[in-house]
């Protein structure tokens, strides 16, 4: 079993720190500044501030934990739910947030507007958020059947193949569309059930 070798040279420690975290690299650079030396340039301070703001304030909480205010025993922390986090101070709980790592910024998904409505997610232009997030399609409850679906195949085929009926063309198209949908769903359901 190999034991990990830590760098002994101060320059190697700084390089390892820079590689591990941008925030740690900024802190290491700040600590190397000589207090008796000259002033730090404004551009350098702004670069440090931008790095720290991006690294420290873009992290999302991975887990909330709580403990009782008078409990200091090992293992006293437990995972907290939203109610315990919100009402913790009134109930005498100490709350802490655990961060796994800073959030990696994702590229924004832009809306595609046509007639002031997004064609992807359906949001109107006035209410659309920064990212285009399409909603999940609703599950059709008709796709789950509690009986043998083969019973409906022949009557549905008769409805589709039926000749002119004394109803208007709109109702005829709607019924044919509904029957075709049911037939296709039943065929897919039967094929799925017959797979080994």
Image (spheres, helix red, strand yellow):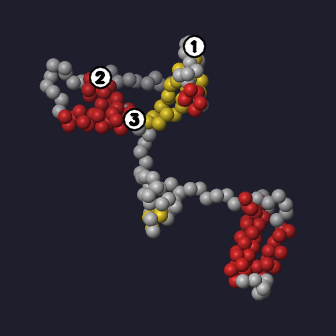
Q: Which numbered disc flags the more N-terminal residue, 1 or 2?
A: 2
Q: Residue at x 50, y 25 (%)?
A: 96
Front residue of this view, candidates 15 and 84: 84
Dot 1: element:
loop
Q: Residues within 10 Å of mark 1 (few under 14, many from 20)?
A: few
Residue at numbered disc 1: 71
| Disc 1 to disc 3: CB gap under 8 Å | no
User: In screen coordinates, is 22 left or right of 60?
Assistant: left
User: In screen coordinates, is 4 left or right of 35?
Assistant: right
Q: In this view of the protein, can residue 54 be seen by the observer?
A: yes
Looking at the image, is 65 positioned above or below residue 43?
above
Residue at numbered disc 2: 9
* Image disc number at residue 57: 3
Q: Which numbered disc flags the more N-terminal residue, 3 or 2?
A: 2
Looking at the image, is 4 positioned above or below residue 170?
above
Q: Outermost residue toward the left? A: 38
């Amino acid at each position: 079993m190999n034991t990990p070798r830590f760098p002994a040279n101060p320059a190697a420690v700084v390089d390892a720190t820079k590689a591990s975290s941008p925030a740690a690299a900024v802190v290491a650079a700040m600590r190397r500044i000589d207090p008796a030396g000259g002033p730090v340039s404004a551009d350098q301070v702004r670069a440090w501030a931008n790095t720290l703001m991006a690294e420290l304030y873009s992290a999302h909480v991975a887990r909330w934990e709580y403990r009782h205010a008078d409990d200091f025993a090992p293992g006293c922390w437990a995972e907290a739910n939203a109610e315990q986090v919100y009402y913790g101070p009134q109930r005498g709980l100490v709350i802490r947030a655990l961060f796994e790592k800073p959030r990696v910024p994702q590229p924004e998904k832009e809306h595609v507007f046509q007639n002031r409505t997004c064609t992807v997610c359906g949001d109107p232009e006035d209410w659309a958020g920064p990212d285009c997030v399409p909603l999940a399609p609703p599950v059709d409850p008709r796709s789950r059947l509690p009986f043998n679906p083969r019973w409906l195949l022949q009557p549905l085929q008769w409805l589709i193949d039926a000749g002119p009926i004394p109803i208007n063309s709109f109702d005829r198209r709607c019924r044919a569309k509904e029957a075709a949908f049911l037939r296709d769903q039943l065929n897919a359901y039967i094929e799925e059930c017959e797979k080994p």
